[in-house]
Image (cartoon, grey):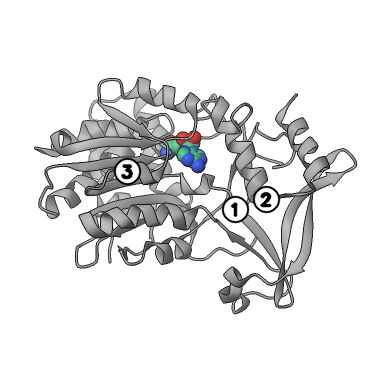
């Protein structure tokens, strides 16, 4: 039995699946899910994320959060949380850099939210010299100031897709054509959640909704809004998405999302407008390109400092990593950063209100 067989059996008995059901099953099925069964990162894997490109990414994110913590009066006990920590590399780089900030590590209680048992093991290994706690759901976050980071987490949350049909919408589904998985459309129905999108779309346009986004943001804002703190969210996407952004990636190349369920990474662009709306009543920063954010935090100075100890191919790789993280034609513009923080306080350094 494979995940494909399992999905086909489900479609034969239950009918076509919603895209978010298919997407979530492919990524996190307990037995055959993409993340549940593997460590997908790096050259030998399927894709490379910013923390895996250079230690500078986690260091600068950490120092931005630590400065916000100082600006907030250095609360004596707080949650330092990461959503979807991957290999734990970002958190390790963050903790190493923030050891320079007096009192920060002593006050921090590190909490990780990770759905994949395979990646939890990798994180435990990477962070073995630190005390960290894994929590199963956001509601388990302690009720205290919260400083949170999420890099390429929200793009892994399943989306639904709707195609406009007059004033109604047809939901994109996964069904069968013969014995092959195939996309289809459900019947045209009103979608009250998409009322606002009737103003900026026309017949045939496709829009996406990420159902898990608002509940996660509300757990974050419930703590930040009352106890203080900040969330730094980095992901690819833009202010309001339009069109099909579902993407499958395997071996660093685009793949067919239906070809081999559970064998490719699936993502969808993050809708930063939906994020900003869900952040209320907390304030949110401007959505800022990753390259601009990292330059403001001094990545070039840090890169020059690290370069002093490097020669040959290590130096070449380091220069390429700096460029990859910041250049507008690489990750610099595609990836965006937004912060959520209490009203009447300033955003973390690198971002503007
Ligand atoms: N932040 C890491 C990894 C990004 S990949 C990095 O930048 O390298 C997405 C991560 O989120 C993986 O660790 C994946 O297992 C985790 N993940 C995906 N969906 C999740 C969910 N619903 N709940 C918790 N973790 C999830």
Tag 1 or tag 3, which sits nearer the N-term?
3
Task: Give the structural element (helix, strand or loop) at label 3.
Answer: loop
Seen in the image, is 221 located left or right of residue 174?
Answer: left
Q: Position of residue 164 (x, y in %)?
A: 71, 70
Q: Which mark is residue 141?
A: 3
* Separation of residues labelled 3 and 2 (CA atoms): 29 Å
The residue that mark 1 highlights is 159
Q: Nearer the viewer, residue 235 or 55?
A: 235
Tag 1 or tag 2, which sits nearer the N-term?
2
Q: Residues within 10 Å of mark 1 (few under 14, many from 20)?
A: many
Instruction: Say whether marks 2 and 1 touch (CB < 8 Å).
Output: yes
Task: Give the structural element (helix, strand or loop) at label 1.
Answer: loop
Instruction: Say whether marks 3 and 1 touch (CB < 8 Å).
Output: no
Q: Quadrant of the N terminus?
A: top right
Give the residue at x 16% y 42%. 77
Task: Give the structural element (helix, strand or loop) at label 2.
Answer: helix
Give the residue at x 64% y 42%. 248
Q: How many marks?
A: 3
Q: Is residue 96 above or below residue 232?
A: above
* Separation of residues labelled 2 and 1 (CA atoms): 7 Å
Query: Which mark lies nearer to you, 3 or 1?
Result: 3
The residue that mark 2 highlights is 19
- Asked if residue 249 shows in the view, the reply is no
Tag 2 or tag 3, which sits nearer the N-term?
2
Q: Is residue 280 above or below residue 158?
A: below
Q: Residues within 10 Å of mark 3 (few under 14, many from 20)?
A: many
Q: Is mark 1 within 8 Å of ligand 1?
A: no
Give the residue at x 28% y 53%. 223
């Amino acid at each position: 039995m494979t995940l494909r067989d399992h999905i086909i059996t489900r479609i034969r008995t239950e009918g076509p699946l919603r895209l978010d059901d298919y997407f979530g099953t492919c990524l996190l099925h307990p037995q055959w899910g993409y993340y549940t069964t593997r460590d997908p990162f790096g050259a030998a894997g399927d894709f490379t994320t910013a923390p895996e490109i250079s230690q500078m990414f986690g260091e600068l994110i950490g120092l931005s959060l630590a400065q916000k913590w100082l600006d907030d009066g250095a609360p004596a006990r707080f949650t330092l949380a990461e959503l979807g920590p991957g290999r734990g590399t970002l958190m390790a780089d963050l903790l190493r850099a923030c050891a320079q900030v007096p009192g920060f590590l002593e006050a921090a209680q590190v909490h990780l939210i990770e759905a994949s048992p395979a990646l939890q093991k990798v994180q435990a290994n990477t962070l073995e010299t630190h005390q960290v706690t894994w929590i199963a759901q956001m509601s388990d976050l302690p009720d205290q100031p919260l400083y949170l980071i999420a890099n390429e987490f929200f793009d892994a949350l399943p989306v639904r897709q709707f195609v406009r049909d007059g004033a109604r919408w047809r939901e994109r589904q996964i069904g069968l054509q013969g014995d092959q998985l195939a996309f289809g459309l459900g019947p045209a129905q009103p979608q009250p959640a998409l009322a606002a999108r009737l103003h900026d779309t026309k017949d045939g346009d496709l829009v996406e909704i990420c159902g898990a986004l608002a509940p996660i943001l509300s757990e974050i804002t419930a703590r930040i809004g009352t106890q203080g703190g900040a969330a730094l969210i980095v992901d690819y996407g833009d202010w309001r998405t339009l069109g099909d952004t579902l993407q499958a990636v395997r071996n660093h190349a685009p793949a067919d999302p239906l070809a081999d369920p559970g064998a490719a990474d699936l993502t969808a662009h993050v809708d930063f407008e939906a994020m900003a709306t869900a952040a209320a009543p907390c304030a949110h920063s401007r959505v800022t390109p990753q390259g601009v954010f990292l330059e403001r935090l001094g990545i070039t100075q840090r890169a020059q400092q690290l370069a002093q100890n490097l020669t040959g191919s290590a130096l070449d790789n380091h220069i390429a990593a700096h460029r990859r993280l910041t250049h507008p034609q690489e990750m610099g513009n595609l990836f965006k950063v937004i912060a959520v923080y209490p009203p009447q306080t300033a955003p973390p350094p690198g971002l503007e209100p």
